Image: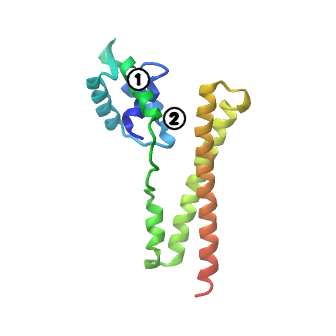
Amino acid sequence: MALPQAILALLVDRPQSGYDLTKNFEKSVGCFWKATHQQIYRDLAKLEAQGWVQAEAVPQEGRPDKKLYTITALGKQHLTDWIAEPCDTTAVKEALLIKVFVGAMVPSHVIQRQLEQHRQLHQAKLAGYHQTEATFFQNPETLPAKARLQYLVLRNGIRYETYWIDWCEEAIAYLQTVSGQN
């Protein structure tokens, strides 16, 4: 996935400013795609140059004009074409796995502490996802088509966090078992 498509996806429902996009990015697609404020603004300029979005200057009192971005018909066509294209899996970029891979350089408790911290981070994310599920997806079988697809993405996030929690617990238990054998 590319950042331009993520931005276009957020503009499908309503026009947004760059600030709003940055804020909404984190609350929606931000759980599986990361982007900085600067990256979003840079790509908005590129999308506008390609004709995929258009910006309207909205005057603000005592502040610079705000740009409100709207996806164009060309942008919607691009997004539709992009959705139909096959995509590859994304390589895992996980610093914790490098630490575990080379963890023999430090005492076992250092790696176990890293695993425990990581487990706690994933538990917090999982709790947030469960809260979103309880708030917005109480009856998944009755959801309209768009919400069903968003629910599937949320379910992927729940399974992803659950996987990491399970793996961290497995790794901690394994290291505790084998460190007693040394």
Q: Residue furthest bottom?
A: 182
Q: Which class describes the residues within 10 Å of circle 1: few (<14), some (14-19), or many (20+)?
A: few
Closer to the camera in the image, 20 or 44: 44
Amino acid beneath label 1: Gln
Picture quarter containing residue 23? top left
Residue at horizontal 41 percent and vertical 23 percent from the top: 77
Amino acid beneath label 2: Lys
Q: Position of residue 22 (x, y in %)?
A: 41, 32
Q: Is residue 111 above or below residue 44?
A: below
Q: Which residue lies furthest to the left in this view?
A: 49
| C-alpha separation, residue under disc 1 versus residue under disc 2 | 25 Å
**Residue wearing tag 1:** 77
Residue at horizontal 44 percent and vertical 37 percent from the top: 85
Q: In which quarter of the image is the C terminus?
A: bottom right
**Residue wearing tag 2:** 27
Q: Which class describes the residues within 10 Å of circle 2: few (<14), some (14-19), or many (20+)?
A: few
Q: Position of residue 156 (x, y in %)?
A: 59, 44
Q: Is residue 29 above or below residue 63?
A: below
Q: Position of residue 81 (x, y in %)?
A: 42, 29
Closer to the camera in the image, 97 or 76: 76
